[in-house]
Amino acid sequence: MTSPEARYTVKHHAMLYAREIGLVNRKEYLLFSVEEDEQGNVTLTTAVGVTLQLPDLQVL
């Protein structure tokens, strides 16, 4: 159970890399995200993505 008055510190650092992939108006992205809580626990998350254009999306 948590209290609304309780405080918990988390440090967050992120770095985003991008590179051309040889297609017009398209890039590939790599995101590194690191979080460290006040107890010293570290979490590393990575995410990969590409540039999307409006024709890439379809509303259902």
Image (cartoon, rainbow, N blue to C red):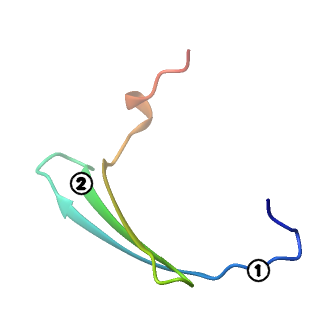
Q: Quadrant of the N terminus?
A: bottom right
Callout 1 secondary element: loop
**Percent coordinates x, y for residue 37 in the rendering:** 54, 79
Residue 57 vs residue 39, the one in the foreground: 39
Q: Determine the image quadrant of residue 29.
A: bottom left
**Percent coordinates x, y for residue 32 in the rendering:** 33, 68
Number of residues whose C-alpha sits closer than 10 Å to that of mark 2, classed few (under 14), some (14–19) or many (20 or more): some
Q: Which residue lies furthest to the top in this view?
A: 60
**Percent coordinates x, y for residue 25 in the rendering:** 27, 50
Residue 43 vs residue 40, the one in the foreground: 40
Which tag, 1 or 2, sits closer to the chain's start?
A: 1
User: Badge 2 is on which residue?
Assistant: 28
Q: Viewed as shown, does residue 23 lie left or right of 37?
A: left
Picture residue at 33% right of the left edge, 64% below the top: 31
Picture residue at 40% right of the left edge, 29% below the top: 55
Q: Residue furthest left?
A: 22
Which circle marks residue 7 in the picture?
Answer: 1
Spatial CA distance of label 1 from label 2 is 37 Å
Residue 41 vs residue 17, the one in the foreground: 41
Number of residues whose C-alpha sits closer than 10 Å to that of mark 1, classed few (under 14), some (14–19) or many (20 or more): few
Q: Viewed as shown, does residue 44 lie left or right of 26?
A: right
